[in-house]
Amino acid sequence: MTLEQVMHEVEKINAYVKKPLWLDFTFKEIYKIDEAKDFRIVLIGSEDLFWEGYESIEIIFKTPSYISAKLLDCFSPCEGKAFIEVVSDVKKSPLKDADFICEGYLFKFNMDCYDFSPIWIYAEEICCNILKEY
């Protein structure tokens, strides 16, 4: 996935997150598809996470090699900041001392939840599925 494709997906996600009055996010799945490599992290966003089937957006990270977050039950976008950013300078992240960096991109989620640090995910690809239009 090229940087241009990644930025397109990130811009699509950030634009979508601004539309509804409120969206909560949670980790839906962290799983491995096959023995070779195909891991995925799936986040879902919804106006109400307690009602199954009311998801608004699904964000999929393909072949992730790092996640810094505690698996929070629920988090929301931070008002006034982009919800998700692509960080080009790994030295300004929790990965600054890592030796295992693989192919991919570093994503930072800015959350409006209490005193938690941002969520960091390093993955080869990102895509989103819009499940509900506003």
Image (spheres, rainbow, N blue to C red):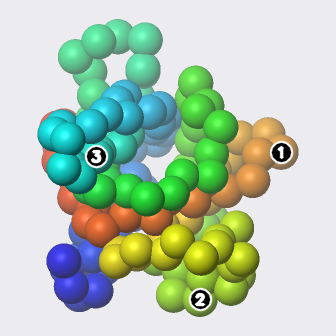
> Which residue is under mark 2?
89
Q: Is residue 18 visible?
A: yes
Q: Nearer the viewer, residue 132 or 72?
A: 72
Image position of 2 with respect to 35: above or below: below
Q: Earlier in the sequence, mark 2 or mark 1?
A: 2
Q: Residue at x 27, y 62 (%)?
A: 126
Q: Quadrant of residue 94?
A: bottom right
Q: Give the SS element for disc 3.
A: strand
Q: Give the SS element for disc 1.
A: loop
Q: The N terminus appears in which quarter of the rendering? A: bottom left
> Which residue is under mark 3?
39
Q: Residue at x 21, y 85 (%)?
A: 2
- Callouts 3 and 2 close, C-beta under 8 Å: no
Q: Nearer the viewer, residue 105 or 13?
A: 105
Image position of 54 with respect to 131: above or below: above
Q: Earlier in the sequence, mark 3 or mark 2?
A: 3
Q: Give the SS element for disc 2.
A: loop
Kind of residue indicated by mark 1: Asp
Q: Quadrant of residue 28?
A: top left
Q: Position of residue 34 (x, y in %)?
A: 16, 39
**Numbered mark located on residue 69 in the image:** none
Decide: few, some or many residues near mark 2? Use Cα within 10 Å; few <14, some 14-19, many ≥20: few
Image position of 108 with respect to 75: above or below: below
Q: Earlier in the sequence, mark 3 or mark 1?
A: 3
Kind of residue indicated by mark 2: Asp
